[in-house]
Amino acid sequence: MSEMLRVENLKTYFDTRKGLVKAVDDISFSINKGEILGIVGESGAGKSITGFSLINLIDSPGEIVDGSILFNNRDLAHLSEDELSKIRGGEISMIFQDPQMSLNPVITIGKQLIETVLYHNPETSKQDAHKKSVEMLELVGMPAPEKRMASYPHQLSGGMKQRVVIAMALINSPKLLIADEPTTALDVTIQAQILFLMKKLTKEFGSSLILITHDIAVVAQMCDKIAVMYAGRIVEYGSNKDVLYNPKHPYTKGLIQCLPRLNEEKTRLYQIPGVMPSLLALPVGCYFSDRCPYADEECKVYPETITLEGRLVSCHKVK
């Protein structure tokens, strides 16, 4: 498969009054055409900032300070805002956590979809853009799509709004779709429908998908490759099969142990002790050492990333 995106040594820092926050600190990964990559980790791991960095949507005091984001041989980290605006929503689209925040409350769904088409395809007529918008709403399973074109966001349920956002993200047939916790605000039944829909449509469109989530069970069923993030860094990265069925990093093992199993009787689920450290007060050495059952003196130096059995791992105890 041909490579769609390659991220190398990406660093996104926030220079705050309290100190320098290394939200994304020297991460590397790649995604091929048609692949689904899952970025998983607890809140505060740097997952969302990674997604925003890929399309250079970092607000001050944040800044991409180093690294490259090669998308079809163009480095997105060094393009002008005008060049990036042509790529965002066209070649690369992003689905944000809260669909309510992605939609303008005083503009109809139809007008927002039509504007998305016309911005990236100014030669398209309004009639054709309208037709394409209705077809896309139908494709994402929106009931009565023609009628919904005249609806405002507040008139739709959470699941309907998320379908609109997915339609908007896919309407220009992007090569890469970034989904940041796309089902957070939805109930479990709708979550499953939306995830199935996204997987189905990205395959149909021949797009690549980066799925950002805290739920390792979701990446297990959705993704071809998995990157496990902790405190701004990728601690394990490899194929779905390698990472989930033979995890090497203690943090990855902990996340998998937290999952409930129907074939086991347990009164209490496993819980990783402690919490994610503040990015302003990281432990000396390995950032996971304060919570790791295997930590010792060796862990007071941050481990190098090594290649082991088909995946990348950052841990002294894995050799």
Image (cartoon, rainbow, N blue to C red):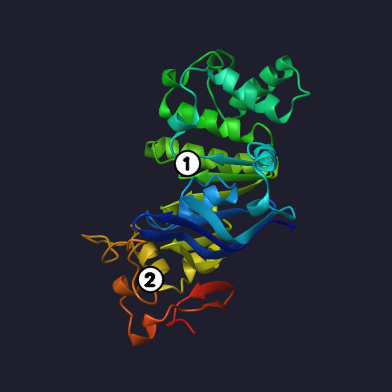
Q: Residues within 10 Å of mark 1 (few under 14, many from 20)?
A: many
Amino acid type, label 2? Tyr
Q: Residues within 10 Å of mark 2 (few under 14, many from 20)?
A: many
> What residue would you read off at disc 1?
182
Count the labels in the image.
2
Query: Image height check: is 274 above or below 87?
Result: below
In this rendered view, identify the residue nearer to me: 109 or 218: 109
- Sequence-first tag of 1 and 2: 1
Does the image show residue 220? no
> What residue would you read off at disc 2?
287
Where the N terminus falls, by quadrant? bottom right
**Percent position of residue 178, x then y:** 57, 46
Residue at 46%, 74% (x, y): give it: 248
In this rendered view, identify the residue nearer to me: 267 or 180: 180
Gap between marks 1 and 2, in whole Å?
28 Å
Q: Which SS class for mark 1?
A: loop
**Left or right: 259 as drawn, with respect to 145:** left
Q: Which SS class for mark 2?
A: loop
Query: Image height check: is 125 above or below 64?
Result: above
Does the image show residue 213? yes
**Percent position of residue 252, x then y:** 42, 67
Residue at 67%, 45% (x, y): give it: 80
Q: Residue furthest left?
A: 267
Camera-near label (1 vs 2) is 2
- The part of the image, by quadrant, that contains residue 111 is top right
**Left or right: 177 as drawn, with respect to 315:** right
In this rendered view, identify the residue nearer to me: 25 or 226: 25
**Percent position of residue 113, x then y:** 60, 24
